[in-house]
Image (cartoon, grey):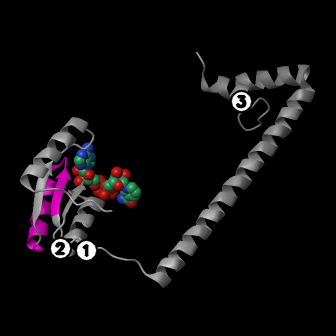
Amino acid sequence: MITKQHCVKFLIPSAKFYRTPTTRLSILHQNNTTSNSGEGNNVFLKIYSLMILVLDILSLLVKVLLAVLESIYYNIAGVQEKSVSGEIVLITGTGHGIGKELARQYAELGAILVCWDINTELNEQTVQELRKMGAKAYGYKCDVSDREAVLELAKKVKAEVGGVYRPD
Ligand SMILES: NC(=O)c1ccc[n+]([C@@H]2O[C@H](COP(=O)([O-])OP(=O)(O)OC[C@H]3O[C@@H](n4cnc5c(N)ncnc54)[C@H](O)[C@@H]3O)[C@@H](O)[C@H]2O)c1
């Protein structure tokens, strides 16, 4: 059986930070037999790790720069907004948190809400709140981890409420 210690032993033969009884033996063995190649591996690993770190930092900087440029562009050019008023918007996890907040915001924009959640009680509270806001809202119990249940419920929603809005 391959254990974590074996992995450490084979992947980092000379690593000082991961010394366990097994790796200590391995290091001693290597130092006694192939000390030169061990040192070579160690230097190679250090250079490799440094290169990965530098690449990671560079890729992060490029992503930050692109995000800043994109946001400047959209601030100047403006974003073309599309109305969702009267559109059927289906949101999962509407009983609490992000899903509930999204449902509120779509309700403010005049959308028709289809609320799916595994927790019927919490979901019903959300649906009632949305209706008080003047929105049309329909609650359904659904476990989104159950693919068959999701497909079945999608058919039911299509028949009872209508086709769900699809952004372009
Ligand atoms: N809160 C954050 O900052 C944050 C950030 C990034 C990603 N997320 C992810 O977004 C999702 C929602 O986060 P949240 O903070 O609003 O969570 P939350 O726990 O506040 O709400 C989750 C809602 O989903 C429902 N739910 C849970 N399992 C379900 C299932 N199998 N089928 C249907 N409904 C189910 C719960 O009943 C609950 O109403 C989570 O997957 C979370 O990992 C959250």
* 70 with respect to 132 (left or right): right
Q: Is residue 43 above or below residue 166?
A: above
Q: Nearer the viewer, mark 1 or mark 3?
A: 1
Could you tell me which quadrant the N terminus lies in? top right
Could you tell me which quadrant the C terminus lies in? bottom left
Q: Is residue 144 above or below residue 129?
A: above
Q: Residue at x 65, y 58 (%)?
A: 59
Q: At label 1, which amino acid type do we have?
A: Ser
For label 3, the crowd category at 10 Å Cα-Cα, with few meaning under 14, some 14 to 19 and many 20 or more, is few
User: Of callouts 3 and 2, which one flags the residue occurring earlier in the amino acid sequence?
Assistant: 3
Query: Is 7 included in the stretch rendered in magenta?
Result: no
Q: Residue at x 73, y 55 (%)?
A: 54
Quadrant of residue 49 within the rendered picture: top right
- Name the residue carrying label 1: 83
* Residues at discs 2 and 1 in contact (Cβ within 8 Å): yes
User: Of callouts 2 and 1, which one flags the residue occurring earlier in the amino acid sequence?
Assistant: 1
The span picked out in magenta is 113-134
Q: Is residue 35 above or below residue 16?
A: above
Q: At label 3, which amino acid type do we have?
A: Leu
| Whole-number angstrom distance, CA of label 1 to CA of label 3 | 55 Å
Between residues 61 and 15, which one lies in front from this camera angle? Answer: 61
- Name the residue carrying label 3: 11
**Residue at the extreme front:** 168
For label 1, the crowd category at 10 Å Cα-Cα, with few meaning under 14, some 14 to 19 and many 20 or more, is few
**Residue at the extreme left:** 160
